């Protein structure tokens, strides 16, 4: 009896572990320089452990098996390092990890390891030289009156897929190195940027007009949304995730006026949302269903005829709070393509269902219903459905075509003329002299 109870308990615990691994229990490998980071960043790691299955290892550990026998042992990697001794993961392995659709979040500071710099460069983001900081003499915390490297940055707006709705949220404290996004692209973008008066440089040198990056282009946190929907995030600050910055009050230095004071920074909410987005818990879309049919018919047709009225419907869902919910947007478009788009129409959405009605072009061949939704912060959404479009059958053409009436008239006139000529030729007699 006791043995049966024991076997049942073991089976139940295994089932619970399996359920956790399948529902939100994604395996995360955390690499850092030393275990002291767990105490200096305890709030961040506590929030991380509440959502994911987390394993910790030192970045200089050569025995960490990130990939074994061709299989990845982790879904996500979080690398916190300022040391050059990173042996647990190489830049080549990190890029391979991203290429296979997995996610990585990297945070460093002004002492940038070579491996981290190489990974960022491969993802089209480049850190400034070692020993530099982002400096802003107009938007810094009042506690930093000497170097002005502790920046007060407004909570980012316009990134609802990552942070949701931003309303009166506390600003973020940032102290670290700056980045520059090497080229404008739909796959890499800035999540957190400096102000118009910020620049990257050394506090011990006069920068002048030769700053590596300055103004709004000064990127503090960048993100890669790859075409395979893998995500990579790069932060130039380790302090951004620290207990000190999370619990710190924020008071921006005021130039001759009163500044607004916050009892707590927005770093905890910012970093928590950043991790969830990077690990594909936010801003992830999927196509639930696609349908198309002639207007007035409930079932889809295997073959369409030119100039028919067709209704197209696609149902899209977004992953939020550990569940799939209807996606809400007003800018989803469908294209009807054969080499080039013959029809492009904006879909009307209601409760996650987006639909439109249009007339097929007077061109026959193999066409494609294509929805390609690429927006900052959302995963890439592609839907392709191919259908044949045939010309009219011989008995489907109109008996008389308006455009052909001139030809009908000319044919009729020829017939009438021939008839009259025949009458004249047959019944007219020539008079004899």
Image: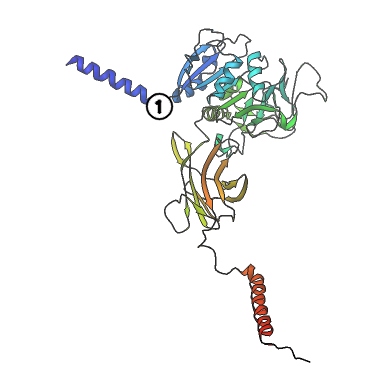
**The C terminus lies in quadrant:** bottom right
Say which residue appears at 73% left-offset and 30% top-offset.
Answer: 138
Q: Residues within 10 Å of mark 1 (few under 14, many from 20)?
A: few
In front of the other: 69 or 394: 394
- The location of residue 239, given as percent across then percent down, is 61, 20
The foreground one among 415 and 244 is: 415
Q: Is residue 247 visible?
A: no
Q: Which residue is mark 1?
A: 22
Residue 406, position as x, y percentages in the image = 67, 71
* Residue that appears at 44% across and 38% down: 324
- Quadrant including the N terminus: top left
Indicate the secondary structure of the residue bearing disc 1.
Answer: helix
Toward the viewer: 389 or 258?
389
Q: Quadrant of residue 218?
A: top right
Q: Residue furthest left?
A: 1
- Indicate the position of residue 313 as horizontal and vertical percent values: 49, 49
Instruction: Tell me: residue 83, above or below residue 420.
Output: above
For the question of whether residue 292 can be seen, the reply is yes
Name the residue at the front extreme. Answer: 433
x and y percent of residue 10 in the render? 28, 18
* The one of 376 and 428 positioned closer to us in this rendering: 428
Q: Number of marks in the image?
A: 1
Q: Extreme right residue here?
A: 208
């Amino acid at each position: 009896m006791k043995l049966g109870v024991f076997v049942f308990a073991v089976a139940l615990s295994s089932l619970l572990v399996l359920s956790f691994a399948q529902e939100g229990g994604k395996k995360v490998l955390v690499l850092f320089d030393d275990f002291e980071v767990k105490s200096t960043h305890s709030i961040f790691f506590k929030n991380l452990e509440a959502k994911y299955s987390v394993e910790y290892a030192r970045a200089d550990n050569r025995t960490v098996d990130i990939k074994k026998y061709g299989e990845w042992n982790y879904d996500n990697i979080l690398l916190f390092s300022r040391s050059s001794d990173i042996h647990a993961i190489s830049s080549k392995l990190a890029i391979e990890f991203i290429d296979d659709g997995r996610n990585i979040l990297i945070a460093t500071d002004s002492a940038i390891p070579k491996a981290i710099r190489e990974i960022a460069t491969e993802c089209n983001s480049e850190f400034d030289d070692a020993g530099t900081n982002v400096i802003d003499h107009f938007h810094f915390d009042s506690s930093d009156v000497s170097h002005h490297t502790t920046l007060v940055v407004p909570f980012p707006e316009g990134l609802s897929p990552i942070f949701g709705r931003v309303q009166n949220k506390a600003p973020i404290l940032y102290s670290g190195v700056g980045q520059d996004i090497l080229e404008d692209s739909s796959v890499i973008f800035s999540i957190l940027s400096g102000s118009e008066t910020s620049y990257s440089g050394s506090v011990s040198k006069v920068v002048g007009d030769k700053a590596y990056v300055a103004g709004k282009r000064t990127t503090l946190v960048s993100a890669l949304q790859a075409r395979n929907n893998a995500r990579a995030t790069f932060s130039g600050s380790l302090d951004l995730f620290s207990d000190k910055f999370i619990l710190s009050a924020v008071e921006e230095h005021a130039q001759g006026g009163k500044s607004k004071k916050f009892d707590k920074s927005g770093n905890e909410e910012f970093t928590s949302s950043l991790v969830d987005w990077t690990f594909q818990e936010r801003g992830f879309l999927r196509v639930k269903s696609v349908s198309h049919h002639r207007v007035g018919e409930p079932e889809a047709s295997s073959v369409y005829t030119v100039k028919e009225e067709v209704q197209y419907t696609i149902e899209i869902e977004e992953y939020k709070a550990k569940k799939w919910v209807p996606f809400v947007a007003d800018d989803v478009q469908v294209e009807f393509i054969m080499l080039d788009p013959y029809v492009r129409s904006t879909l009307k959405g209601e409760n996650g269902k987006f639909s439109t009605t249009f007339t097929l072009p007077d061109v026959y061949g193999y066409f494609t219903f294509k929805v390609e939704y690429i927006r900052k912060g959302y995963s890439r959404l592609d839907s392709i459905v191919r259908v044949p479009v045939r010309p009219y059958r011989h008995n489907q053409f109109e008996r008389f075509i308006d455009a052909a009436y001139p030809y009908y008239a000319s044919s009729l006139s020829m017939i009438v003329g021939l008839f009259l000529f025949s009458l004249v030729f047959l019944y007219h007699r020539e008079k004899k002299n």
